[in-house]
Amino acid sequence: MALTDKKVFDEKGGFELTDLRGEKLHMVSIRGAELHGVDARDTSLVHVNFVGSKWNHIYFSNVHINETQLGGTVFENIRRPDAAESRFEEEAGTDGWVNVEPVTFRTSDLSKAVFEECDLSDADFRDCKVDTMRINGVPVSELMKIYEEHRALPQSVKDFRQLREETISFAESVPADKLDLIPEGYSNSIRWNLGHLLAAWDHGIFPKLGGSWRIPTVYHSMFPNGTSPRDWRSAPPSLKEIVRQLRDQKEQITLELPSHLDYPLAEPFLNMSTMAEMLEFLLNEEQHHQRTMRAIAEALENGAAFEPTPAVPAAVKLPPFAVVGVSFEANLKEINEQELGRKAFEEVMARRDEIEGRLSEDVYLVQIYPQKMNFNPHVDPFTQLIGYKVEHGSAAGAPDGLAKREFEEKEYVSYTHRGPESELGRTYDLLYGRWMGENDRRPCGYDFEIWGSRYKPDQPDNEIDLYIALAPK
C-alpha cells in the first residue's frame, strides 16, 4: 500500500517519484518496508516506526522528524550536496533545487551511536551531554580537561569561565516551578538574575570593544537594572534558551577578550578606563548574582512567602464549577469558515437572562478534546461550549437548546494572554508546548478561556485568562 497516490516526475533524473512533499506522517508504521524513489522534502514525521525498513534514492531535506525511534538504524553513504549554498543547479532533482542547509539533531538520544569514517568537520555540538563520549577511545571529558589546563588564557578569563560554569550548573539544578517565584524581601526571581547576567556581560564587553550586542534584544528590555519580573508583559526566554546563551557568551568572551584586556573602553563606564577593569567589575557582578540566586533558592526551600511572576504560566488548583451555554462540535477550519464561535457567542448573550445562577458576567469558552492519539484540531472535531459559570452541583439545569457541563476540582496551568485575539495561537503554543515540556506535565483533555471586562479581541490591550487542565503527576 502506498503512503500517497501523488506522483512527481523528476525531469532531470528521468524517473517518477512518490510525492510526499509537505505531508505530515503521524502514527505510521512502515516497519520492514522498502522505500525507493520518494520526494520527502519539507515532510513532518511524528511517531513513525520504520524499524528494518530500507530507504533508497530519497530526497530528504528540511524534514522534521519527531518522536521517532531510530534504534538499529544505519546511515550509510549519506551526503550533503557539494555546493556552497542552497541554490538551483543543473543536476538530478525534482526541480533542480539543491539544499545544503546543515542537518540538526535536537533534544535527541544519540547515546551509544557509532560514527565510523564520517566527515564531521564543522560539526557543532551545542549543550550536548558528552561526559562519556569517546574519540578514538579517549573520553571527551579527559580531552576537554587537558585542553582547559593547557589553554593559554589570562587568569581573569579562566576565572570567568569557572564562574560561568558554576552559574550554568546552578541554573540547571533549579526546579522549573521555582524559577519565577519572588520571595518576600526580594524584588526579582532566579530567572531574572540569570537573564540579567547575560545582559550585563553583553553590554559590558562588546560595545566597550567597539562592537554591538550579541544576545537578542529581549534580554536588554526584560533584564536590565531597575526592571522586575512584576512588570513583564510577555513570557521571558525559556531556561533552556538562557542556558544556551550563557554557554555561547562564555565562548564568545573567551575568544574575543583576552587580546584586548589592555584596550581603553570604547564607551565610558563609571571610573573605569580599560577592559581589564571592566572584566574585574563583571566578575564581581557574577559572584553577587550567584549569591543572590542561592539566597532566593534557600528562602523558597525554607518556606518563605512569595509571589509568582504574572507573565509566567503557573500551576493552580481550582474548585469545581459548571458552565451553561451554547455547545457545538466542529474542527477549527469549520469554526472559522462558518463563524460558529461568533454565532454561539451572540446566541448566549441574547439568552443570558435565561441562565439561572450566573456567578458573574464573564463569558467562558470551554474546549473539550477527544482522547485520541494524533489529535489535530484543524481537521478533527472537538466540543466548544460558550456560556456562563454557574454553581457546581446545582439543581438548575440548562434551558432548552443550551447545554450544561460540570468540571471537578482540578489542577490547571494558568496564563493571561495579552494582545489581539488573533495572536492567541502563540500563547497556546507556549502552554501546550514549552511549559508542558519544561515542567514535565501533560494536558488532561480540555481548557477554557475567560472573557471578562478586559476582553477586547481586536485591541492591543486585550487580555484573556487561559486555563489548561493538567493530568495528575
Image (spheres, rainbow, N blue to C red):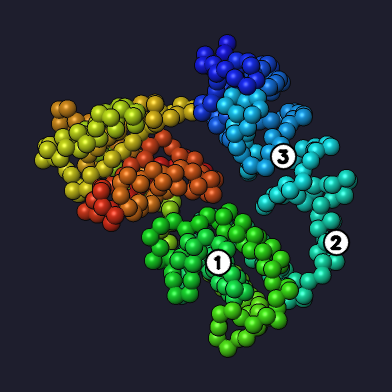
Q: Residue at x 68, y 80 (%)?
A: 263
Q: Amino acid at mark 2?
A: Ile
Q: Amino acid at mark 3?
A: Leu
Q: In the rendering, which numbered label is found on residue 213?
A: 1
Q: Pointers 2 and 1 in contact (CB under 8 A)? A: no
Q: Position of residue 268 (x, y in %)?
A: 55, 83
Q: Secondary structure at mark 3?
A: loop
Q: Amino acid at mark 1?
A: Trp
Q: Can the viewer see residue 187 in this picture?
A: yes
Q: In the rendering, which numbered label is found on residue 312?
A: none
Measure the C-alpha gap from mark 2 to mark 1.
32 Å
From the image, which quarter does the N terminus lie in?
top right
Q: Nearer the viewer, mark 3 or mark 1?
A: 1
Measure the C-alpha gap from mark 3 to mark 1.
34 Å
Q: Residue at x 77, y 46 (%)?
A: 121
Q: Position of residue 262 (x, y in %)?
A: 71, 81
Q: Secondary structure at mark 1?
A: loop
Viewed as shown, does residue 62 lie left or right of 385?
Answer: right
Q: In the rendering, which numbered label is found on residue 146?
A: 2
* Corner quadrant of residue 60: top right
Between discs 3 and 1, the one toward the N terminus:
3
Q: Which residue is mark 3?
A: 110
Task: Tell me if mark 1 has few (under 14), some (14-19) or many (20+) residues whose alpha carbon lies within 10 angstroms of its own.
Answer: some
User: As drawn, which residue projects farthest toward the right?
Assistant: 137
Q: Position of residue 12 (x, y in %)?
A: 63, 22
